[in-house]
Image (spheres, grey):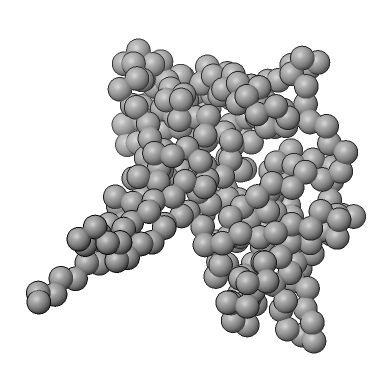
Amino acid sequence: GQVMEFSPYDWVEYVDAMIGVGSNLDAAVKIELVLHSQVLFAVTVKRYQTELEPDFIEGTVAFDRRTSLLLDVDELSNTHISTIYLNQPEQHTSDLVPIRNGGIDTGTWSFDLSHRAAGLWVIYPTADSVIQFRPFLWVVGDDKGVDPDEQLIDTLSKAVRVVDESRRRQEIQNVLRLMVSDSEHKSWIYLKNLWEKTKHLPLYTFDVWRVAINEPTFLAALFFKKNEGLIDRVLDELPILWESVTLADWIKLFVQYRDRMALVLEDKQMCEDLIENR
């Protein structure tokens, strides 16, 4: 009979687009080859390869036993894990230390709770890690979060700490709108620090991007910020209805950017040249 060959790489663009429709880190696309009503081949494509299991008592993270047995020594030794403190993403953190037995990696890493500030920590694979596992959140210590009924939530660092998910999303949305109207809002620095440390991770790792898909004017404001590579990732990963950004919004953002540049440069001609080149 006739032989037909299909390369999965030919479908990468379409698979990425379909995964992006689901505003969830765990979204997946299932591909099946069906012949005469029989499924001959099936594969599920996710944003990550596997998951780590946290031990909240011992302060460790590890691959499950089955995954550890499937990975060879080189893969384990070249799996690198880092952390980011969501309360203050600019804070420097070191990679997790692997736990070894007789000098051999065991697939377990120490999170060392005694040296962690109370709050929200995201554990994630570094950009050069051979295994790209699912990032996850670890709440350290007696952090009760932020209560929007008791204090004003006017920054992303506060909004991400709201415990209730629906309230958290609402508070993040409110802050994003503040950022649109204020190009010097301190949360722009928060977002820049978060992006610089985690630019290799799926955007849906963080609540701010899951909320941002419903705030296209905020995403439009990103065009006027210097975050290298971010706009390309936004266009690739987020299902954005750009038509909902009005011409008036674009003009307002442009004028805001122009005025800020004029104030910083104190040279009208240089400002106009910069804007024209950009």
Identify the image quadrant of the N terminus.
bottom left
* Residue at x-position 35% and y-position 62%: 42
Where is residue 154 shown, x and y percent of the image?
A: 68, 20
Where is residue 46 shown, x and y percent of the image?
A: 46, 55
Q: Is residue 93 left or right of residue 51?
A: right
Quick check: can you spot residue 172? Answer: no
Q: Is residue 36 left or right of residue 153?
A: left
Where is residue 155 shown, x and y percent of the image?
A: 67, 25
Q: Is residue 152 left or right of residue 198?
A: right
Residue farthest to the bottom? 102
Vertical placement of 85 versus 175: above or below? below
Identify the image quadrant of the C terminus.
top left
Vertical placement of 255 versus 143: above or below? above
- Between 131 and 94, the residue placed more toward the observer is 131
Q: Quadrant of residue 190?
A: top right
Where is residue 17 shown, x and y percent of the image?
A: 34, 45
* Residue at x-position 58% and y-position 40%: 206
Q: Quadrant of residue 257?
A: top left
Vertical placement of 6 versus 260: above or below? below
Quick check: can you spot residue 68? Answer: yes
Q: Is residue 54 left or right of residue 256?
A: right
Residue farthest to the front? 37
Q: How many marks?
A: 0
